[in-house]
Image (cartoon, coloured by chain):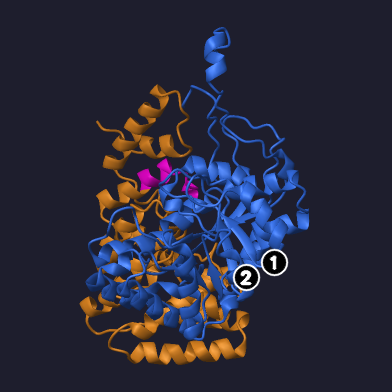
Amino acid sequence: MNIEESIRTVIAKNLDAATIDWLDQQSEQIKKEEGSSTFVKTFSQIPRKLFKEKSLIETGDIAFLSGFVKNWSPKDWTIVRLVRVWIIMQVKDNNSETYQKKFDLLFDNAEMNELSALYSALPFFDYPEIWKDRCAEGIRSNIGTVLEAIMYENPYPRNYLDEDAWNQLVMKAFFTSKDMLRITGLYERNNLKLANILRDFAKERQSAGRPVPEHLQELAEKFNES
Amino acid sequence: MCSNHNDRNENQERIVLSADLSSVNGMRFFDPHVHMSSRTTDDYQAMADAGIVGLIEPAFWLGQPRTGLDSFRDYYSSLVGWERFRSSQFGIKHYCTIGLNSREANNERLAEQVMEILPLFIYKEGVVGVGEIGFDDQTAAEEKYYRLQLELAKEAEMPVQIHTPHRDKKKGTQRSMDIAIEHGIDPNMVIIDHNNEETVKEVLDRGFWAAFTIYPFTKMGNERMVEIVKQYGAQKIMVNSAADWGISDPLAVPKTAALMLTKGISREEIELVTYSNAIRAFAQSGQIELSDLVAISPINQSEKFEGNTILRGGQQPRVDKSSLIIS
């Protein structure tokens, strides 16, 4: 079983038969379509189809799904988000540029929850290298749930962001008081440049009489400029 | 403060910065028409304190004309994106209506393009109607795009939020209703807004929802609103603030509730007019979950707060505005 099949299994547990049928029908069309209209429409409609469904994924299922992808977990995901990510997995294209274009409309016009779902799906897009700029753009967002979707239990930034973009992610996380231990790769991706920025930031906080965020000193001390 | 100079005292009224809403402490309010994009976080904080648990922001114009499609698209995006999030930071559920407003319908070249992107937004989560649409000057172009959007609302099975013109209001309101009926729209799906003493009777008689904008100087006042409720009852009547860039008050709904209490209107009627009628009308979109609103506990204003208390579970820390200190 792969991650897509495992997600489908969990979805099937949570939805009624009619909705699953509809999803499967949409999925068939999405796999075949040249453009993205079915995909976009389906993606946006998920909350309407699942309107009564407000729950988060059950703990047991979270553990089950996490086993399929390294450093990943759908810990805070709603069923709606899980379905949306599964739908994203149905999009196919032989050409990386046309593939990426299929998602442009959604990213540009996304509603708050749609946007969070899209960024949650970063580890599952095909042609992973082409999503680096989108990821960096997402880190610039002020919408808290979007930042969390990128940062928490999401291996994409750890695996693909270049050093400067990674450093921006960590700084943004400290600035917006994120739960640092949930950031995948926080210790593995630590680097000298970041350590210097963090050291300066700690001094800035101390001069201002403000608290230095937890874990910041620890990261800064791992590299000492000699 | 300056109470030593008697002659000054006689001529100057002391400006009181906030109204006493303690009589409506614990009540929940819903403002179905407020342009939060034009308001600051101070307003959001005040609204949360006053018991507003949900609101609807209609798509409107920005005070000067947009010149390109992207401006419309980015604005619609902000209504379902950033503004929705900003509102959630204060524990207020933010819904919106999406549409091409009457003023900008007059730019036909642009209007045509906007019509094409409306379907991208009206089916999104939390979009509770097509609005605010209708007439401004009552031109042919306005009529054209009003009709087209009525059809869109009908196809999408969404409520319609209608802005009635401020100039030639009586005729404009009648025309808006006539055209809605002509297109086969169920009046129960239509909220006619910015009513006054001259429009209310026909709007109610013809089965539409009647919304009233409590807005200083230019629109409805709430003492007059009390009289309207006394005359027509509370059925299918709702109030809103339509607070925007102009001189307006985002606390109009709770203030109206408090005023109504002093004037002898029953709590049941107040609740209809400042909360449940609006929800019922727009919940026909299928996008309002009452449990979401009920889950928000109104702030107990008698509770003391410290400089940085976090309200409503993990949202914005409170700033003490009475202090000179900002830190």
Which one of the lettered chains is coloured blue? B
Mark 2 closeness class: few <14, some 14–19, many ≥20 residues within 10 Å: some
Check if mark 2's residue and mark 1's residue have beta carbons within 8 Å.
yes
Q: Which residue is mark 1?
A: B235
State whether the magenta stretch is mostly helix, strand or loop.
helix
Residue under the image location 41 percent in, 24 percent down: A208
Residue under the image location 69 percent in, 66 percent down: B235
Quadrant hosting residue A224: top left
- Position of A135 with respect to B263 (left or right) is left
Residue type of the residue flagged with mark 1: Gln
Question: Taking the image as drawn, is residue A183 in sight?
Answer: no
- What is the display colour for chain A? orange
Question: Taking the image as drawn, is residue A79 in sight?
Answer: yes
Q: Position of residue B234 (x, y in %)?
A: 70, 62
The answer to which of A176 and B141 lies nearer the viewer is B141
As for residue A45 lying within the magenta part, the answer is: no
Q: Which residues are magenta?
A: A170-181
Pointer 2 indicates a residue of which chain? B
Q: As displayed, is residue B47 above or below residue B142? A: above
Q: As displayed, is residue B151 above or below residue B256? A: below
- Position of B257 with respect to A205 (left or right) is right
The answer to which of B123 and B172 lies nearer the viewer is B172
Q: Which residue is mark 2?
A: B204
Residue type of the residue flagged with mark 2: Leu
Distance (Cα) linking label 2 and label 1: 9 Å
